[in-house]
Image (tube, helix red, strand yellow):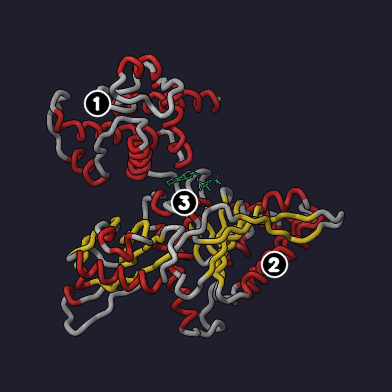
Amino acid sequence: MNPPTPSTSPTPSSLVWPIHIEVRLSPTSTARFDTIRNAVHQYICKSFETIALPSKLDGWEDVPVLASSVEQITACESSSPTSYLPVAQASLQIHVYQPTDGDTVDGFSAGLSSDGEEVTAASVCELPSRQWEGLWDSLIFSDDTKSRLLDYIYATVLFSDANVDFNIVSWNRVVLLHGPPGTGKTSLCRALAQKLSVRLSHRYPQSRLLEINSHSLFSRWFSESGKLVQKLFGSVMELVEDEDTFVVVLIDEVESLTAARAGAMAGTEPTDALRVVNALLTQLDKLRHKKNVLVVSTSNLAKAIDSAFVDRADIVQYIDLPPPEAIYVILRSCLLELTTKGVVAPIDVPSLEEARYFERTTVTIDPSVASQRPRQIAIHLFRLAQKCRDQKMSGRSLRRLPVLAHARYINLGYASPPIAATDSAAQKTVNGPNAPGPSGLGAQVEVWLNAMEKVVEGQAGELKRFDQ
Ligand SMILES: Nc1ncnc2c1ncn2[C@@H]1O[C@H](COP(=O)(O)OP(=O)(O)OP(=O)(O)O)[C@@H](O)[C@H]1O
């Protein structure tokens, strides 16, 4: 999406590429968004010749109007083929936003069941929300899944704006993400909703994420699920009636709502199941005419989903287990977080690109040479990533490895925050023999990597026993 805007000369250097700049305001800021937008535009044009993508910009702290209101400025993606773009060739798309304080989640009633009890079938969250900040960037996939989803939305907005005749060219505003458990499907849906609330804020001043718990809705109120789905979507429709609000409807485990129709038609499933699927499909068909809604759904059991639902999905995206490169980035993000918080001693952890370079170039490593440490760490982390891949680990399993590694092999003891470097005797006593390095807080990175490796090997053994 966002194709380059050709200018007078046809040479590549005369193309202008849109760059998305996201500006997060502090909770206390009362500044007008357009004032901030103009100030950011001026600051970027004055301060930079080239912008790295993606990157966090700095230096804005010296601009008083920004210093008093802004928390973070991020240069996100661009459709430009390079990751360094001259500002002269950039059309800055500046998105200013002020996230709400997180816990604005309300229960969402689907009405009363026949015994008069209120059914909380969904939760609603105001967006952008602090609880989903950073989620988009934390999700690592091997392909361009994230940009494909964003581009799809931009395409639908473009078509809607152009008033394309829906009888001739139509789309359903439904996305289906499917794949093994723990691969980031639900997180990606939430992160996408957050991203859209920021990116579309110029046309939709408000955004809401409505999460439907399809499983509990279906299992608990089996005999009346069809009616409840209808009521729930009736309320969604009310929310969507406000054309200033963009609504993302997340249906997790969609197979539990849509699984049964084929069986029902063959006479092997109860008719209630048939009613649920029919109700859902009818409601989706109504929603597709609304510009300000997107339905995102996830499933671990794609084969169980009703084909009529799959057919309605504009994008059906398989989300696979992470490959070694993605695992490297996920583990690196864990390590960086632990070094930042003082649980692991501070260290430069090579980026994926640097690690790839180290892998390609062989040198004899001398552990006593300090300058070779990043290379050693990168190679060790890569080896760990490969082991995780051999175990077919999901993103969820990867993110819990550090806590298991500390619990089992680093023996931090009960010291929080870790004891300061000056008190080395106390460190050894409280944090255990492996924990703090001589340089300061936290365990040495090599100790951490070995511990992580042991956990992965241990899990392999457990899984073998589980399979027997
Ligand atoms: N590709 C990934 N990159 C980074 N983190 C990931 C990735 N996949 C999963 N995670 C992390 O794993 C955790 C679980 O992810 P999530 O619940 O979104 O997975 P899911 O696919 O929806 O799982 P399920 O199908 O079991 O509901 C999250 O904390 C998420 O950050």
Say which element carries label 2. Answer: helix
The answer as to whether callout 3 falls within 8 Å of ligand 1 is yes
What residue lies at 30% left-to-right and 70% top-to-bottom? 39
* Distance from the alpha carbon under mark 3 to that under mark 1: 41 Å
Q: Amino acid at mark 2?
A: Ser
Nearest the eye: 397 or 191: 191
Q: Nearer the viewer, mark 3 or mark 1?
A: 1
- Percent of width and height locating residue 368: 15, 23
Whether pointer 3 and pointer 1 mark residues with C-beta atoms closer than 8 Å, the reply is: no
Q: Residue at x 66, y 67 (%)?
A: 236
The CA span between labels 2 and 1 is: 58 Å
Quadrant where the N terminus is found in the figure: bottom left
Mark 3 secondary-structure assignment: loop
| Viewer-nearest of discs 2 and 3 | 2
Q: Residue furthest right?
A: 115
Q: Earlier in the sequence, mark 2 or mark 1?
A: 2
Q: Position of residue 366 (x, y in %)?
A: 14, 25
The location of residue 406, given as percent across then percent down, is: 42, 26
Q: Is residue 289 left or right of residue 222?
A: left
- Name the residue tied to disc 2: 235
How many numbered marks are there? 3
Q: Residues within 10 Å of mark 2 (few under 14, many from 20)?
A: some
Residue 319, disc: 3
Instruction: Tell me what residue is drawn at x 70 percent, y 58 percent.
Output: 262
Question: Residue 439 — which label?
Answer: 1
